[in-house]
Amino acid sequence: MKKHLFILISFVILINCAHDRVQESSTVTPLDYNNGKLSTGTVSTTGLIAPQGYEFSEIRPSSTPGISCFYLNFQEKARYSVSDDFVIPQNEIWNVKNISFYVINPDPVSANFSVKNIVMEIYDGNPDLATSKKVYGNLDTNLFKSSAPTNIYRITNETTKITDDPSASLVYKVETTIGNDLNLKAGHYWYQMTMKFDYGEDWSCYIPRLPQKGNNENSFNAYYKNFDNGLVFKTDNGVYNGTIPVNYETPFQITGVKTTF
């Protein structure tokens, strides 16, 4: 009996020591993940200089300044969501407090900004695939926290001036509040997000696509989806002058606490 008791006590001590070693070998640091680089600098390819304190995010001309992302409560067929992915390394756990998105202001001279309702889901795979499972969120709970202008203008290589130019739009940062309950282990995740608008609000907002300059175009795999017919849009279709289509990718930021083992 004493022999069995000794073995049991030794086993418990061994487990506790192993747990202590794991605790000692892990570090907790602030999490600040940024998906891609939105700025392309202060001078455009045509020599246009950004205003003092501002930068450009230059893309080639497209049919829209960004990716459609809106959910109109008063119009069933006008509903689009945006999805993109991120990867958590094998030796990390993320406690996510906030996910911030970037939105193009439809009116660059307006001091008002209409986004007040943002909803989001997170999946363990592409949300458009039946094999993917939702791990967080829904498309009903409003996660909106705040919005503020950045110092970045979305332009194209055809933009000739900033003031009153429809091809020059100020980019806003929209923050969400996640809380304390989103802990993600290592894996490949996707978000699905949209912004809801009520009748009478200015809902002509877009998510700015990442520019090719300064980013790895081979990793671009974002898309926006039409809720009404299920169509998925992954590229700009090379709409101008027979140009080769470029895949979409979105800028977003994830902050919180990261545990590394």
Image: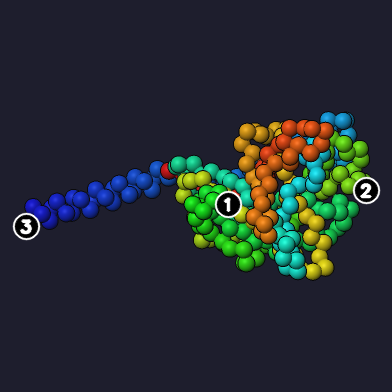
Q: How far from the left and from the top, in percent, is residue 214? A: 70, 33
Q: Can residue 32 be seen in this snapshot? A: no
Q: Earlier in the sequence, mark 3 or mark 2?
A: 3
1 over 63 or under it: above or below = below
* Tag 2 residue: 164
Q: Secondary structure at mark 3?
A: loop
Q: How far from the left and from the top, in percent, is residue 32? A: 60, 46
* Tag 1 residue: 128
Q: Secondary structure at mark 1?
A: loop
Q: Quadrant of the C terminus?
A: top left
- Of circles 3 and 2, the one toward us is 2
Is residue 47 shown left or right of residue 122? right
Q: How far from the left and from the top, in percent, is residue 166? A: 89, 47
Quarter-of-image position of residue 197: bottom right
Labelled disc at residue 1: 3
Q: Secondary structure at mark 2?
A: loop
62 over 107 or under it: above or below = above
Q: Quadrant of the N terminus?
A: bottom left
Label 1 – label 2 distance at C-alpha: 38 Å
Label 1 – label 3 distance at C-alpha: 59 Å
Label 3 – label 2 distance at C-alpha: 88 Å
Is residue 122 shown left or right of residue 58? left
Q: Using the image as rendered, state which of residue 9 and residue 234 is in the foreground.
A: 234
Is residue 26 shown left or right of residue 79? left
Which kind of residue does numbered mark 2 sit on? Answer: Asp
Q: Using the image as rendered, state which of residue 108 and residue 204 is in the foreground.
A: 204
